[in-house]
Image: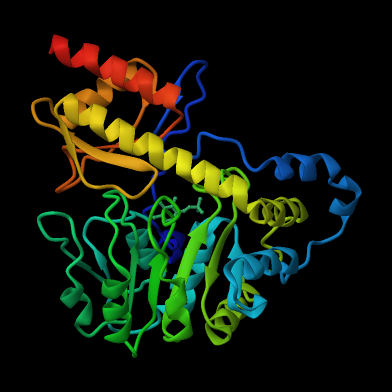
Amino acid sequence: MDWRQNVRTAEPYVPGDQPDKKGMIKLNTNECPYPPAPGVAQAARDFACGSLRLYPDPACGLLTGALADYYHVGPEQVFVGVGSDDVLAMCFLTFFHSDRPILFPDVTYSFYDVWARLYRIPYRTCPLDESFRIVPEDYMQPNGGVIFPNPNAPTGILESIDTIEKIVKANPGSMVIIDEAYIDFGGVSCLPLIEKYDNLLVVQTFSKSRSMAGCRIGFAIGNAETVRYLNDVKFSFNSYTMSRLSLSLGAEAVRDRAYFEETTAKIIRTRERVKKELAALGFSFTDSMGNFIFASHGRIPAKQIFEALRAHDIYVRYWEKPRISNYLRISVGTDEEMDRLTDFLREYLQGV
Ligand SMILES: *Cc1c(COP(=O)(O)O)cnc(C)c1O
């Protein structure tokens, strides 16, 4: 008998590189290029470090309250965690507990199959159609749960509320989790549907549209019963997930609606402008509604462009995976960063 037989082996998720080079342009992990709301910096300056000797509020009331106000739901309908990755991991553990496979797209956020394997949850992937759209009927087969991002990642394609509702309605016997990490960049959230369907949970994050990837805040909104189940699992795992500092800065970020709307509008404007420039350079892409563009070049393989960019300290994301190995996922940075990207590409493409 070898102790290794008792190890819970895992095949971990591989996050995008976090290079830290002077002058680099980092467009590989969909961070926001703008700082968090000004109130966040003020709250950080005002933060009473003496309070760090005490445990934080395990119920995270400050943050769930701020989110409940913002989204017009009850605080008992909000669950928060250490980034939406933590929230999603808790959702997998809580709601995906069936012998039937959970369902998600073949091309999607590559953490889902990692959690499924970690928790020994059976899963089946449903192929997106040839234009990378979800086929709603695929999610009407017997299943132990459904999860996908809307807009999807890394394609950026947004599905309509009607499509989401059809899928939720067809699955009264399982939880449907919609990962809205990118919903604030021009999509319409399916949040209103939680009033109508108790098997729907909506997950969002502060990492992209609220410029706080480094703070690690994510949340789920559902009904009081689903949130209770999530909290029961969380309190069986780690009661104090959110630090006092995260709670305080997170609540502050939610308060500034104007800054949030201005920042997301700026990113959308830059995205649409850069789409036109990339089209002129021979790229084609999906109609991304995220803070990134999922692009493929008509002549030069994506991998080659990815390496050329990296050699010039411009970082984008590339996956050597079926169906998407000729695409680059380019996060939307500031206008200046995007100009440097397109300037480089213009010159590079002339020479190859
Ligand atoms: C970025 C991302 C997340 C996780 O973000 P956190 O930083 O953990 O909040 C979850 N789902 C999708 C689809 C993402 O792109």
Who is closer to the viewer here, 265 or 346?
265
Residue in the foreground of this view, choosing between 189 and 205: 189
**In the displayed structure, does residue 158 sit left or right of residue 78?**
left
Residue 238 visible somewhere in the drawing? no
Q: What is the residue that sits farthest to the right in this orientation?
A: 50
Position in image of residue 50 (x %, y %): 91, 49
Image quarter where the N terminus lies is bottom left
Tell me how the rendering is colored. Answer: rainbow
> Would residue 207 be seen by someone viewing this image from the given angle?
yes
Quadrant for residue 325, please give it.
Answer: top left
Q: What is the x, y in percent for residue 275?
A: 27, 35
Number of marks in the rendered image: 0
Q: For the C terminus, which image quadrant?
A: top left
| Point 54% across, 43% down: residue | 262
Looking at the picture, how far across and down is residue 303, in whole percent? 20, 29
Q: Is residue 235 left or right of residue 201?
A: right
Whether residue 102 is situated above or below residue 334 in the rendered picture: below
The image quarter in which residue 181 lies: bottom left
